[in-house]
Image (cartoon, helix red, strand yellow):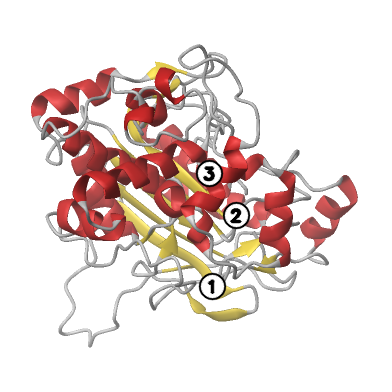
Amino acid sequence: MRRFGVIGMGLTLVAAAAVAGCGNAIEQPAAWRSPAPAAPAYAVALDAKLQAIMKDMRVPGAVVMITSPAKGDWTKAYGTRTVQGGGPVTLDDHFRIGSNTKTMTGTVLLQLVQEGKIALDDPVSKYQPAVPNGDNITITQLLDMRSGLYNYSEDEQFNAQLDNDPTRVWKPDELLAIAYAKPPYFAPGTAFHYSNTNLILAGLIIEQLTGHTLQEEFQQRIFGPLNLGQTSLPPNTDSGLPAPHPQGYMFGTNVSTLTDPALPAAEQAAAANGTLLPKDVTVSNPSWAWAAGGAISTAADLTRYVTAMVGGGLLDAKTQQTRMDSILPIGAPGPIEVGYGLAIVRFGPLYGHDGQIPGYNSFMAHDPVRKDTVIVLTSLFAGADGKQPANQMAMAIMQALYGIPAAAASPSPSR
């Protein structure tokens, strides 16, 4: 598959169609309207930067939601729901959120840890005996991407099946069989490699321990308590998104962008001049992502969720601290520190995750000190240059809020 995002950490319009920002407020008679709140000081320059990113990357539509007690809140919806138009994107639109789902799976598993139903140092073989070298892989190493297990979504034949039969319904055991047939990347605990296989296993273990589907556990433990009425993990047979939603787009194919997400130079030029448009992949069945990347949400719901996930409220104080303390640096040092822990990412002062799944790219993060929250949702998987649009926009937002260079794009272990 492609990366589900992360740290992916690691768009497209018809040439004549300009990307325009648009809000979702209902027009009211002037006498009924309250004065619109003044935009925060950073918004004008940031808005111009975000529109430039969308234009350069050919992003059809996006939603940005910023909560900042110190700098001021700001939200905006951009673009249209299809490359041909299809009406404006609104703040209420639903997007696939890819690997942000991993944080939900990790949260539920950590809740089961604090309930005494599983321990982080348990070997995965205790619950899934078929895992290669499972006696030496701990639950912690599943969640912090240090198990060494092969990532099924890096398999070329698997990606070819996604291209040739995008509506196929995948079962977790089929995904694990792909992973188990390949040698591990390294001995458990000795390195970092982003692998969706880890979270498929975590989802299966949750179902074993609770006797409920992962969807039911998400609803009972996360969506319900936080009142996330627009967030869901659909059944594996469901390829649709709730209304309203933009169509999701992708340049190239899963196979052609597997090794190098950037298109060949000639195709990048064609995308830039509008003669090459991305393909609509909205109805691609996300069952292959499941516990690693299958959820759907909105900007408002993700704001509530990531604030609780990072700031506290879903785990007890001890388990929450264990999660936050688990983050270790990944990749080479850069302008911001990027780290990965128990299904959570650190982007400098912000903590959360990102997500990339065919058709969509997303970023969610919260600063537990300043209480800032940043949400970016886009209806393009990646630009023709292979860069992730939501991450590029998020870095521009971080520059506006923190003075962090916009070029400090986060690495992307999520394929």
Regarding residue 48, the answer to whether it shows in the image is no
For badge 3, the amino acid type reads Leu
Residue named by callout 3: 176
| Mark 1 element type | strand
Tally of numbered tags:
3
User: Can you say whether 402 is above or below 196 in the image?
Assistant: above
Residue at 47 percent of width and 47 percent of height: 355
The structure residue drawn at horizontal position 75% and vertical position 66%, both measured from the top left corner, is: 277
Disc 2 from disc 3: Cα separation: 24 Å
Instruction: Calculate the distance from the C-alpha at mark 2 to the C-alpha at mark 1.
Output: 16 Å
The residue identified by callout 1 is 80
Give the number of the mark in front: 2 or 1.
Answer: 2
Number of residues whose C-alpha sits closer than 10 Å to that of mark 2, classed few (under 14), some (14–19) or many (20 or more): many
Near mark 1 (Cα within 10 A), the count class, few <14, some 14-19 or many ≥20, is: many
Q: Residues within 10 Å of mark 3 (few under 14, many from 20)?
A: many
Quadrant of the rendered image containing residue 28: bottom left
Q: Are marks 2 and 3 in contact (CB under 8 Å)?
A: no
- Give the mark nearer the N terminus: 1 vs 3: 1
Across and down, in percent, residue 413 comes to 55, 32
Q: For the residues marked 1 and 3, what is the alpha-carbon distance in whole angstroms?
A: 38 Å
Residue at 36% across, 40% down: 202
Q: Residue at x 63, y 51 (%)?
A: 382
Looking at the image, is mark 2 or mark 3 nearer the viewer?
3
Q: Which residue is mark 2?
A: 381
The circle on residue 365 is none
The kind of residue tagged 2 is Phe
Q: Nearer the viewer, residue 109 or 24?
A: 109
